[in-house]
Structure formats: structure tokens, C-alpha cells
Image: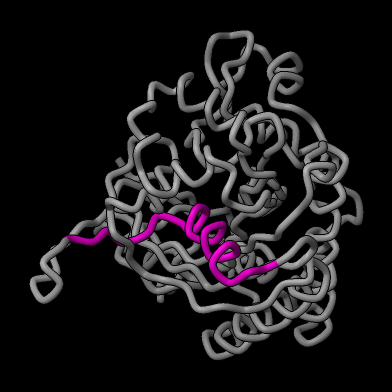
Amino acid sequence: MNHTVIPAGYEPALSLYETQAAISLIKRTFQDHLAQALNLKRVSAPLFVDPASGLNDDLNGVERPVSFDIPAAGMGAQVVHSLAKWKRMALYRYDFHTGKGIYADMNAIRRDEELDNLHSIYVDQWDWERVITREMRTVRFLQDTVRDIVRCISDTSLLVNGRYPRLRTQLPDDVTFITSQELLDRYPDLPAKERENAFVREHPITFLMGIGHKLSNGQPHDGRAPDYDDWNLNGDLLYYSPLLDQAIELSSMGIRVDSESMDRQLTLSGCDARRSLPFHRMLLDGELPLTIGGGIGQSRMCMLLLGKAHIGEVQSSIWDAATRSRCREAGITLL
């Protein structure tokens, strides 16, 4: 089944040449703003990790990583899903202290994605992580960090609009915070993604908090692996796309688990076997720093700021024949 939606009357505002230049401008500008706002240093990041390390991100717990063997090393490897756990280990190994952090370009393959306007098997994002104190593990600190990121996105949008006056992207200044349970209470008859869409139509920048725990309907709003985010201190940053009339998730982020919250979440998820993995042993023993972190989608941000209808207009990937055909008929060029 093809899930691509072509908005009525859609025409790209920028040429292919202008689009490539604008993508470069967005990426340079935003990462500089982010690094300054959150006190981050750029680092190199892995494309693949040792499966036995426990460092790969299990996402919703069902996605299959791309695995391959390395004959010269006598071992196998997995292409990363994200760098959520690797970054925390890196902060420990690189001896970063409170208030300082890292960011990196993260490139991943998510083979089980359902392809549509927003989803590709190729994922590119800024992955960031910052050392915090136990006193910072609060909803207020999480929200303050979200506001810093929103300002970075808005400042980037203003600069890009100034460079390309044909763009019509207008971002509000304020972000609205709501928990996943409050969202369910507000729209009890809608499925999770439709609840998001309904809310962002009224609140164009929303941070949806508390993702992972079961809600009053017996289901979590969305799946979250039990070993990186604290489900009480995390969330998704959603922007409303008038072009697609839906929410675009630009970031998933949160204050990371401490030993107590990971112990609890591993049991709730039936993942107690992970306790023996190196990363998990170190965390349960209190060796790793307390952190906050997340990923911010590069292609999705470019989609939003450049008014694009399909993520394939701002990144190179592989698409099914039906998607290629629909986009070609609509005059949309997939890179």
C-alpha cells in the first residue's frame, strides 16, 4: 500500500540547485546555534557497533537492525538505529563534565520503516547528549532545554527565509507542553497519531511528554526502548505542517534513565536479560554520567523550513515504484 500524499496544487518554492544550497545553509546554521545554546562539542560518531556491547538503540523494540559480518575482525556488527546509548558512553570515556556535551551527525538505516512523506529507510539527524546533575532531572529543566532547541530552529528559519524570499514558512515563537495522558484525555476516541495531528492544528509547536508508560487505555502513546529515556522525563517535539496538514516529529529527546528508572523500565518491558550487557551493567552500577539528550531530524527540518511535501526532496534514499510514480506524475523530483 502506498502512503504518499500529494498536496493539491503543490509546487516546490526552490529549484533543485537552490534546494541543495538551502539544505547546506540550514545544516550549518542550525548545528552552530545548537552547539552554542547547549554548550556542545562536535564529535565523530560510529556508523555501526558491536551487537554484544548493548549500545545499539532498540527504538520501539521490534525494528530489525542491519547486521553484517567482519571476517578480518572475526565478529559481526550492526548499523546503528541511533546513537542514544553510544553518546552517553562517549561522555564517560571522553571525561565530559556537568553542563558540557557532544553532538554528531548520525546516519542510520531503518529497514522496517513504513515509507511515506515523512519516513525513509535512511535516517539523518543531529544526535546530541549533555551531562547534567541529579538536581537537573526535572520536568522544568527538560522544558527549558526544549525551548532552547525551538529558538535555534526559529532563528535558522528566519535566516533561511531572508536568503530565499519565496519561502513562506512562518514558525510561531511559543511551544506548548502536554503529556501523553492529557492528550488521550482530550481525544479519547482518536488513535495516537491522529491525537497528535488534532492537537498541533491548534498548537503548531508542541512538546508531547511522557512517552513509554502505558496510559489509561492500557497502551503507551508510542513505544520507547527501556534503556535510554526516562519515560517520565521525555517527549517528542512536534511541528505542524500546513502543507501536509499533520504533525512532523522533529525530535525525540529526554532526560536519560538513571539506575533506578532503568531497573524499573527493564522489568516493565520484559527486558531483564539486558542487565548483563556492558552498557547496562555500567549504568546500573552508577558508573555512567547522568545526561539529557536526543536526536533532531535533519531531513525533516529541511522539509519543514523549505516547504517540501516529501522527504525524498531533501535526501537521497530508495523508494518503491508506486512512490516514484506518484511523485513523478506530480512533478516532484526525488533526489
- State the extent of the magenta-drawn residues as a range: 76-96
On the rendered structure, is 26 left or right of 152? left
In the image, residue 189 sits, relative to residue 24, either above or below, namely: above
On the rendered structure, is 211 left or right of 178? left
On the rendered structure, is 5 left or right of 210? left
Q: Quadrant of the C terminus?
A: bottom left
Residue at the image point whose x is 70% and y is 17% from the top: 187
Instruction: Report x, y in % for residue 279.
Output: 44, 49
Instruction: Report x, y in % for residue 319.
Output: 30, 61
Residue at the image point whose x is 68% and y is 78% from the top: 26
Residue 92 on the magenta segment = yes
Task: Identify the image quadrant of residue 92.
Answer: bottom right
Viewer-proximal residue among 181 and 14: 181
Residue at the image point whose x is 63% and y is 31% from the top: 231
Task: Identify the image quadrant of residue 168.
Answer: bottom right
Residue 229 on the magenta segment = no
Residue 113 visible, this angle: yes
Viewer-proximal residue among 149 and 40: 40
Residue at the image point whose x is 77% and y is 61% from the top: 98
